[in-house]
Amino acid sequence: MTVLTPTARRSLLTANLFCLASMVIWAAGLPAADLIIPHMPPVALTAGRATLAAAVLLPIWWLLEGRGAVLGADWAMGAWVGFVTLGLASFFVIIALQFNDPVTVAIVTAVMPVAGILLECLADKRPFTRALALGLLLSVAGGLIAVSGSEGSVDFGVGVLAALASVLCYTWGSRETVRALPDLSPLGRSAITVTGCAVVALLAALGDGVLRDQWPDWQAIGIPEFTGLAIFGIGSMAISQLLWIISVGRIGIGAASMHMNAVPFYVMLMVFTLGGPWNWAQTFGAVIVVTGALVAQGLIGRQR
């Protein structure tokens, strides 16, 4: 195992904190989405969510990095990657939430570390070290403990298949966001993919409305529903995606995806703050997940 310098260790710890914060914010969007899902078709909700996120990230990118950085970016690539990473992934997670509760959807994300590490090993020729194997084992074990302690039942139907499709799209797209847009900052990568996703999703939503008459039920959408949409879009997509891309760029999709297995705990934490019960199994599982992510990166364990 490579010896980490104090500077490298601090950088990795910071990246892991960014990743943890991203997961917490993303998890908050799952219960919030329940407020708006009954009143908006999946395609329209994907478009609304992405549009709100783009309305936050794009102006910040323009103000901080200037007109040249925004106009000179590869928008075609950004739109394609954003469509897969955020558009398809968001569409599938909305379908999953229509069939399952938020905790169950969060549980399905336990497969993401496996997908992320396999992608790195196959596409990037990353060596499968003992530390990586141990970290993956701990991450999956923590996810399974969280599953066993969850009140949600996993029914392998349309909802779970949609959640799996969302995880695969998001895993591939997250890696591609960093790989295909190397000249952009994390803010630029996040803003261009979110905005590209919003443009494609708005066109798809318009077509869905014209061809299938799938329009939002505007009369049923009030302040609570719009608040849920704002949390689902600005928080769970814009802010969470920015923190996520920062961490993926520093620690890779494999290690970052391990943090996904702690999402059931974060969802349970949100439910607990709203009056639900505390779940010690999910708490223990989350600790194991984070430990596994740190072990895989050499932040915990013997160094040679």
Image (tube, rainbow, N blue to C red):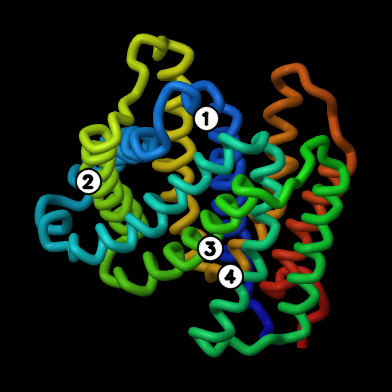
Question: As rendered, which of 64 and 46 lies closer to the eye?
Answer: 46
Question: As rendered, which of 115 and 124 lies closer to the eye?
Answer: 115
Q: Which residue is mark 2?
A: 199
The disc labelled 4 sits on which kind of residue?
Gly
Q: Earlier in the sequence, mark 4 or mark 2?
A: 4
Question: Can residue 180 be seen at all in this image of the molecule?
Answer: yes
Residue 116: assigned label? 4
> Which quadrant would residue 26 be assigned to in this image?
top right
Quadrant of the snapshot with the N terminus: bottom right
> Which quadrant would residue 219 be assigned to in this image?
top left
**What's the CA distance linking mark 1 and mark 3?**
21 Å
**What's the CA distance linking mark 1 and mark 2?**
21 Å
The disc labelled 3 sits on which kind of residue?
Leu
- Give residue 52's position: percent from left, percent from top: 32, 33
Label 3 crowding class (10 Å Cα cut-off): few <14, some 14-19, many 20+?
A: many
Q: Which residue is mark 1?
A: 33
Residue at horizontal 75 percent and vertical 46 percent from the top: 154
Q: Secondary structure at mark 3?
A: helix
> Which quadrant would residue 79 be assigned to in this image?
bottom left
Residue at horizontal 76 percent and vertical 57 percent from the top: 289
Asked whether disc 3 touches disc 2, contact meaning CB atoms under 8 Å apart, the reply is no
Label 2 crowding class (10 Å Cα cut-off): few <14, some 14-19, many 20+?
A: some
Question: Can residue 17 be seen at all in this image of the molecule?
Answer: no
Q: Secondary structure at mark 1?
A: helix
Q: Earlier in the sequence, mark 4 or mark 3?
A: 4
- Give residue 174's position: percent from left, percent from top: 45, 63
The disc labelled 2 sits on which kind of residue?
Val
Q: Relative to residue 116, is residue 282 drawn left or right?
A: right
Q: Which residue is mark 3?
A: 168
Q: Secondary structure at mark 4?
A: helix
The disc labelled 1 sits on which kind of residue?
Ala
**What's the CA distance linking mark 4 and mark 3?**
9 Å
